[in-house]
Amino acid sequence: MHKYLLSALLSAILVIVSVTGCGKSIKNENDTSITEASNELPSGNVSLRVWGAEEDADLVNQIISSFTSQYAGQATFNITFEAHSEANCKDEILGDVINAPDVFTFADDQLMAFVASGVLKKVSNDSEISSRNLTAASEAASINGSLYAYPLTADNGYFLFYNKKYLSEEDVQTMDSLLAAANKAGKQVFMEMTSGWYMYSFFGNTDMEIGLNDDGISTYCNWNATYTDITGVDVAEAMIKIGTNPAFAATSNDGFTAGAADGTFVAGVSGVWDENAIKEAWGDYYAATKLPTYTVKGQQLQMSSYAGYKLVGVNSYSENASWAAKFADWMTNEQNQTLRFTMRGQGPSNTNASSSGEVGESKAIKALQEQAPYSSLQRVGGTYWGAATTFGEAMSAGNPSGKSLQVLLNEMVTEITGEESNGSLDESEAVEEVVEASTDASSEDIATDAASEETSEASTEASSGEDAATDTASEETSEAASEANSGSSVN
């Protein structure tokens, strides 16, 4: 069902918004692909505004300096950095598109809104940009196979940190052995089970699904399913068993590094952002790996995860869109992604940068890459978070209300989807039919639009050809008449 729904959503967006790209790609000595809006980039005064996180100020200003030095003489640049929240980037830009920045960084889950609004157009040198980045990062910047933004980072995910003084490589393979070893040492394992971001790991690798509907706002979810191989109740029971284990701590993520430093935690589920603090706390005993498996319905199931990426967008309404695209390309090349890791500790999406030098030595980056095959893009609506938190709190506390687990699952899914749900097969089949119908309709619309575009292009070319022929004939007639008149005057 997930594939059908995602296809329907992406198709609908492309039907609503005609997103076209133009220009050519050239490659400079720094292996930077440049997207041009015309055959020649304009000279003269070029002003660009660049939005990014406040913490990126020094980094981006250094990138601006190298860019202006690289292309000095081609234009007179006035490029300024403005600090803005990447999390709220979509709301600020869509609230005032005309006065929005020329280049901006944003989280990948905002991509569809930017494309639907027309702020982002296709990246014309998409094959080169995709080839130099990790596949998953390029997919996060794409809709229906077309690239709309430049991948920047590939580190917003989670994995397992652990202390080798207390835990062996074998201990961290399963949640059961991990908790047993921690309990034996009188220590705890940390995971924020009460957060929807982390709670997804229990459901993500089952047959149950969650994602955005074709309106791009509401969410579909069948985590209360009673008909799948692993049911919602199966997962809930597994979560309770883990959550109530004395060696498990389901506190806020903010407390992980403090607990690691004071010796409370010997393992924890978190991300790259905590690597430096954990290295300082555990020293030579610091290690990291993919998430463990957990026991559900009598079998071991690999824990899944959400993965997130930062992207760089070029405002299609920019007065200097060609130079803006060139700067976005420069900002995300291997050289500057490596610089970003050095200055900010953020994992590169660039393939070469992510596997070389200091980046390749990062245990956290390696662990994130190990987890990557079991991760998914975060594509949920706003109703998910509160409902997931309520459910996660109940599971980590051992279901203190005493309600039926199926009832709790039904309540969560109903809140997420906005529709009453009991997890039955009939309910699921009804949704499937709607999704398939929507997908078919969207596909027909896309085919119609494509045909219309081809017809329009052919008509334009034909018209241009006829006009050119007419102009040529007129010029020849005029020249002949002029020569005749000149001859008459001489005589």
Image (spheres, rainbow, N blue to C red):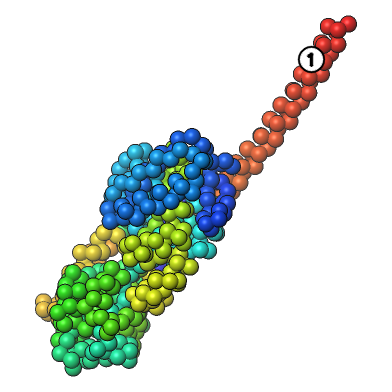
The image shows residue 101, relative to residue 403, as above or below, that is: above
| Element on which disc 1 rests | helix
Is there any visible trace of residue 170 in the rendered image?
A: yes
97 above or below 145? above
Image point 51% across, 59% down: which residue? Answer: 129
User: Outermost residue toward the right?
Assistant: 491
Q: Judge from the rendering whether residue 229 lies leftward or rightward of residue 462; answer left or right.
A: left
Pointer 1 residue:
482
Horizontally, residue 29 falls left or right of residue 306, namely right
Residue found at the far left of this picture: 401
Q: Which residue is drawn at 52% across and 57% down?
A: 30
Residue 448 at x, y percent in the picture: 55, 50
**Can you give x and y, in whole percent of width and height, for residue 183 in the image?**
18, 90
Residue at 61% x, 42% y is 457
Name the kind of residue labelled 1 in the image.
Answer: Ser
Q: Which quarter of the figure has residue 467?
A: top right
Is residue 132 toward the left or the right of residue 81 in the image?
right
Residue drawn 17% across the image and 87% down it: 187
Q: Is residue 481 above or below residue 379?
A: above
The quadrant of the picture occupied by the C terminus is top right
| Residue 297 on image: x %, y % | 30, 87
- Whether residue 126 can be seen here: no
